[in-house]
Amino acid sequence: MIRDQRLRAFHAVALRKSFTDAGHDLNLTQQAISFHIRSLEQELGIPLFNRNHHSVQLTKAGTILFAHAEKILELYGEASRSLAELREESTLRLRIAATNSISKYAMPAAIRTFQSRHPKIQIVLEIGNSTCVIEYLNQGVVDAALVSDGVPFSSNYRVTPLWREQIAFVVSHEHPWAFRKELSIDDLLATPVIMREKGSGTRAILERRLSVAGLSFNHLKIALVVGSPEAVKMAAQAGVGVGILSNLRARHGISSHDLVLKRIDGFDLTRDFYVVRPQNGSAAPMLNEFVSIVQGSIA
């Protein structure tokens, strides 16, 4: 990676509005961050930040420099990625982590298409819930994470929206909801629910939506907690309760003979999917193409 610590320190402080947080992002001490900023201000002959005990704000000069720094660092990243791809072209690998739903219903077709274009590139796929997928990225195990929740806020990462989807409620054909045309939030609170484990993006979406409605997770009648979407589907088919599944999974993995998809009036659940990658990941050109293929497979 091309290094320019002063400019990177300035950029991180401007984003985080904190010398301490910028230091954490860059693995530098607060003293080192302060040194880089002072050095840059002395060279330019003008203050870049207004500092007080509670906040750090860009000056007018800082705002101008920040706009240029964004472009310069992006160019550094592009140069580093192009050189790294050239250096590693004989042993290229694309390492991806993705949540369960994306892995099962979007990745197979995307991988097939990508490898038909780039047969020499090996794809390594790690699968887990949203928390696990982000941890793979944090540990440097993968080049990018395709995730729906738990997106990290850090100047080290670039987060790009992929698509938005509905979360579906599913019940067996024998469940009382199967014959109902209208359902309310009170119906949800009164019936047993099949829930995913902590760390699941689907669960996090439901918890946030309940909070907006002035409710908590404790208001639900949790009949069963399971560790995979397949287990949710099987339990719902067995009549254990109402299942909550990604609409991606509901569209591709459930036939009308299996389960009935229902919606609750005034209680729509939506979630956004993202690709999260390091700012200077070496696989960016390949990754951009692969992400475009994944998006096309969902359409």
Image (cartoon, rainbow, N blue to C red):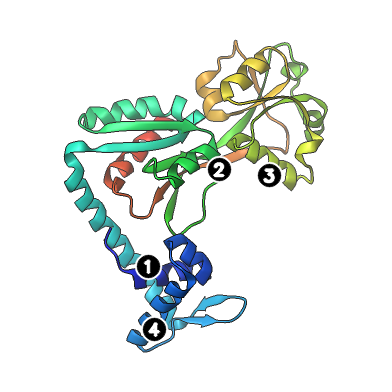
| Spatial separation of the CA atoms under disc 4 and disc 1 | 14 Å
Precedes in sequence: disc 4 or disc 2: 4
Quadrant showing the N terminus = bottom left
Label 2 vs label 3: CA separation? 11 Å
Q: What x and y, as percent, mark residue 3?
A: 29, 65
Q: Is residue 243 above or below residue 70?
A: above
Residue at the image point whose x is 20% and y is 43% from the top: 88
| Of marks 2 and 1, the one in the foreground | 1
Q: Which residue is mark 2?
A: 149
Where disc 2 sits, the SS reads loop
Tell me the amino acid under the disc marked 1: Arg
Q: Residue at x 20, y 31 (%)?
A: 120
Residue at 32% over, 61% down: 74
Quadrant hosting residue 271: top right
Q: Which residue is mark 1?
A: 8
Of badges 3 and 4, the one in the foreground is: 4
Quick one: 177 or 253, which is closer to the camera? 253
Per the image, the residue denoted by label 4 is 41
Amino acid, disc 3: Arg
Can residue 299 be seen in the rendering of this structure? Answer: no
Nearer mark to the viewer, of 1 and 3: 1
Residue bearing the label numbered 3: 208
Of the residues shown, which amino acid type is indicated by label 4? Glu
**Does residue 270 sit above or below 156 in this rendering?**
above
> Rounded to the nearest whole Å, what is the CA distance between mark 3 and mark 4?
43 Å
Quarter of the picture containing the C terminus is: top left
